[in-house]
Image (cartoon, rainbow, N blue to C red):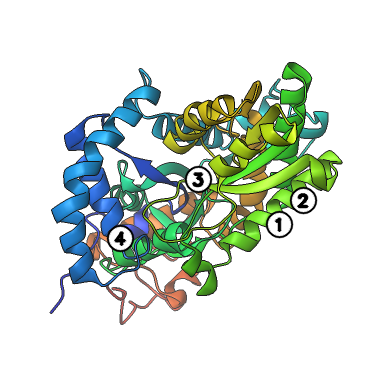
Amino acid sequence: MPEFIGSDQPVHSRLPKVGIILTNLGSPDAPTKPAVKRYLAEFLADPRIVEFPRALWWLILHGVILKIRPRRSAKAYQKVWSPKGSPLVALSQALTDKVRELFNPKTLSEPADETIASSEQFTPENNEHFYSPSEAPIASQVEVALAMRYGNPSIESVMMDLRHKGVERLIVLPLYPQYSASTTASTFDKLAEIMSKLRWQPSLQFLPAYHDHPTYIESIAASIRTHWENHRKGEKLIFTYHGLPQKYLHRGDPYHCQCHKTSRLIAQALGLEKYQWATTFQSRFGREAWLQPYTNEVLKALPEKGIEAVDLICPGFSIDCLETLEEIDMEARQSFVDAGGKVFRYIPCLNDNELHVSMIQKILKPYIAAGFDNLMTPADLAQQKPWIEKISKNNPNSIPTEDTKSKDSKDVDGKDENNKPHENLETSLL
């Protein structure tokens, strides 16, 4: 018989909560060969990442790749590592902290000063961005956490922590704007694996990709406009996305199409003509064909066409990481300059700025509202406390049935309306 993970706390006497998990890919714990090797071993072992016969791939991974690549990758990580650690983890955590602050009861009644897209202000009156002060008790029942698909903080550790805090309804937002089986689906696989171990599973809302969400498009467009205002505008804007093996596209992965749609919508929002922008793909690994055109090849060819000033942005990355900071802002920059280019400007990801915070809240809010339907509030818990205390003396692990919950709150002494003892005071067990 399988042993499922149960609860070590009485579930009927705690206030149920809604949990929000923002997920991202992950990063090594340190820019060292051992740490990178551990990370790559987990990452490249995922069948969603490398679709290859498992036994043969295990031999290639452990016999060749993990003996060569960790040293090279560690040197790349060292170039972008900050005092706070991995840029991806540090910036993702900063973003998560700001999203969590939106559910701080104090925040609900205090306007913020930062400007967001379209010059809107975070104010109590602008309920598109804020919950009203009257919703503070509900907002206090929200737990917000960050989890990484690979590395730390792991999805499993975060889910166990939220479970311990009383989360019964889970909302998961993968910070991948475009869907891919290698990112979004892999995250869902891990969640399902963990859920299969739980005796009491929380309800799960796994949010879809947001590649064409109006708020996402406008947030990216606004960040580009701001960059142009501060640094002038290049002759061409390059949208560069992480690549995938071309065979994944032929097998039905929508990633390629969603990337192109994202680029087109952003270009339209900026009022660009077709010749002023291009979509490319980076991060090719191995010898097989990947999604094209390749970013480096496009950059090398531009100076020959008379284009010497370019702007690059990575709309497929929500947070700056190794692939944006080292591969694009360092390696791709050098490739462009070596080919005769003069001006290369990298436009950062949304990271933890207010555009991103506002965008995430807009995406989350409908799901959060649905998550609170029929969820017990602090007032509900206070009303039921006498009944809960009484029944807990008989069975600390018992939970109320629909019949017992429908009884008048005054009925706390184990007797029915005729002042006779109930035949079945104890309720069903988990």
| Residue furthest bottom as drawn | 423
Of the pair 270 and 382, the residue shown nearer to us: 270
Residue located 68% across and 34% down the image: 304
Residue type at mark 2: give it.
Leu
Residue type at mark 4: give it.
Asp
Q: Earlier in the sequence, mark 1 or mark 3?
A: 3
Characterize the local packing of mark 2: few (<14), some (14-19) or many (20 or more) Cα atoms within 10 angstroms.
some
Mark 1 vs mark 3: give the one in front.
1
Of the pair 128 and 380, the residue shown nearer to us: 128
Tell me: residue 230, above or below residue 309.
above
Q: Please state the horizontal and vertical placement of residue 401, each as a whole percent of the image.
A: 40, 74
What label sits on residue 142 in the rendered view? Answer: 3
The answer to whether marks 2 and 1 mark residues whose Cβ atoms lie closer than 8 Å is: yes
Mark 4 vs mark 3: give the one in front.
4
Tell me: residue 152, above or below residue 290.
above
Q: Real-space Cα distance between discs 4 and 3?
A: 31 Å
Residue type at mark 3: give it.
Val
Of the pair 429 and 242, the residue shown nearer to us: 242
Mark 2 vs mark 3: give the one in front.
2
Could you tell me if residue 66 is visible in this image? yes
Q: Please state the horizontal and vertical placement of residue 143, each as a whole percent of the image.
A: 46, 44
Write down the residue under mark 2: 265
The answer to whether marks 4 and 3 mark residues whose Cβ atoms lie closer than 8 Å is: no
Q: Real-space Cα distance between discs 4 and 2?
A: 32 Å
- What secondary structure is marked by label 4? loop
| Residue furthest front as drawn | 304
The answer to whether marks 4 and 1 mark residues whose Cβ atoms lie closer than 8 Å is: no
Q: Real-space Cα distance between discs 2 and 1?
A: 6 Å
What label sits on residue 46 in the rendered view? Answer: 4
